[in-house]
Image: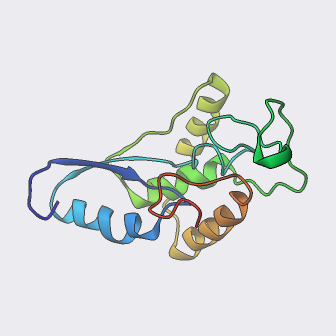
Amino acid sequence: MRDERCDIVMFPVGPFVDERYLTEVLPEAKARGIGTVCFKTFGAGKLVTDTTGYGQPIIERPRGKRSAGVHASAGSQNLAVADCVHFTLTHDPDVALLGMSYPSEQDLVWDAYRSFVPQSAEQLADIAVRATIARQGKGPCWWNPNPDA
């Protein structure tokens, strides 16, 4: 961005992304008038459901393999769709790609959009802490510089 060779950038913005995307990349893009297209609001689904990403189930098998069955993990602490949508909208990217597959998912997102009010710094911090808990045991977050963090 600093060499002014682009007019749009694409990067993750959501409750569980590397902090630099929120504190460095997004503000710099805005300051330079560069468009922002952002993704990972739901962390590949890891923040709102029990998945290793994109609907893949979490069922451990011997030697680290995964099963094709679907079971919710006991004691899951997933975020609400509204938490994730409100977090992203508060950061105000130009475009937020939300990756909804089904009408029921779209309905939840539209409800979250209609109820949106910008979140305070304290609310954002709370959502981020809960996102860290929600994604535990759900595999790497390949969109972050350190996927296992």
Q: Is residue 137 left or right of residue 11?
A: right
Structure colour scheme:
rainbow
| Direction bottom: furthest residue | 122
Residue at 37% of width from left, 71% of height from top? 23
Image position, residue 37 (x, y; %):
33, 45
Q: Where is residue 77 drawn, in percent x and y?
A: 79, 58
Above or below, 9 relative to 16 = above
149 w.r.t. 109: above or below: below
Instruction: Locate residue 132 relative to residue 121 in the image: left or right.
Output: right
Q: In the current view of this chain or complex, which residue is farthest to the front?
A: 63
Choose top left, top right, bottom left or bottom right for residue 100: top right
Left or right? Give the position of 18 relative to 109.
left
* Foreground pick, 103 / 40: 40
Task: Note whether 97 is above or below 133 in the view shown.
Answer: above
Residue 115 lies left or right of residue 136; in this view the side is left
Tell me which residue sits at (81%, 34%) in the image.
67
Residue 22 lies, in percent from the top left, at: 40, 66
The N terminus: image quadrant: bottom left
Residue 24 sits in quarter: bottom left
Q: What is the residue that sits farthest to the top in this orientation?
A: 103
- The outermost residue toward the left is 4
Report the residue at 50% width, 48% height from top.
40
Quadrant (top left/top right/bottom left/bottom right) for the C terminus: bottom right
